[in-house]
Amino acid sequence: VQLQASGGGLVQAGGSLRLSCAASGRAFSIYAMGWFRQALGKEREFVAAIRWNGGTYYADSVKGRFTTSRDNAKNTVYLQMNSLKAEDTAVYYCAAAPRGTVIASTVSLQSRYDYWGQGTQVTVSS
């Protein structure tokens, strides 16, 4: 599976952006898809995930502001980011984990994801 993230950019605080992650390869629908981010000088952290059955999970820091969804027909997963804050500034990565390797209690673990996109920069100005 190859992943291509896009949609990043510069936005003012309070604004919105939608990230997309297009996947190539077969059986996209069976993968759990995760979003992670890495701010300058910090470790990469979990943001959100959506499992093959549509279940969604969010980090506390983005809950209520970010929404992840998937379109299996287009092999694409999305991250809608609203009410952006300066602290959301980071490189955002999408990742894929085969079905059965990620459950509710492990969606936030980077080690469970086998495939990673190249990242897209999101910069929020205050």
Image: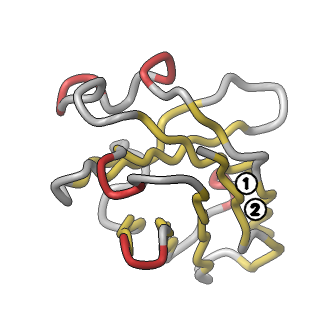
* Residues at marks 2 and 1, CA–CA distance in whole angstroms: 5 Å
The amino acid at mark 1 is Thr
Asked whether 73 or 121 is in front, the reply is: 73
Tell me which residue sits at (53%, 27%) in the image. 114
Please rate how many residues cluster around mark 1, counting C-alpha atoms within 10 Å: few if below 14, some from 14 to 19, many from 20. many
Q: Is residue 86 left or right of residue 72?
A: right
State if disc 1 and disc 2 touch (CB < 8 Å).
Answer: yes
Asked if residue 126 is positioned above or below residue 90 in the image, the reply reads: below
Q: Position of residue 39 (x, y in %)?
A: 74, 39
* Image side of residue 62 versus residue 51, left or right: right
Looking at the rendered structure, the secondary structure element under dot 2 is strand
Number of other residues with Cα within 10 Å of mark 2, as a class: few under 14, some 14 to 19, many 20 or more: many
Q: Position of residue 51 (x, y in %)?
A: 26, 48
Report whether residue 47 is seen. yes
Circle 2 is placed at which residue position?
A: 122
Disc number for residue 89:
1
Q: Quadrant of residue 65?
A: bottom left
Observer-nearest of 15 and 77: 77
Q: Amino acid at mark 2?
A: Val
Residue 35, x across and y down, in percent: 51, 47
At 72% across and 74% down in the image, what residue appears?
A: 7
- Residue at the front extreme of this rendering: 26
Name above or below for residue 95 compared with residue 111.
below
Residue 106 coordinates in the image, percent (x, y): 28, 23
Quadrant where the image shows the N terminus? top right
**Residue drawn at 38 percent across, 65 percent down:** 68
The quarter of the rendered structure image containing the C terminus is bottom right
Quick check: can you spot residue 126?
A: no
Which comes before the other along the chain, label 2 or label 1? 1
Q: Quadrant of residue 98?
A: top left
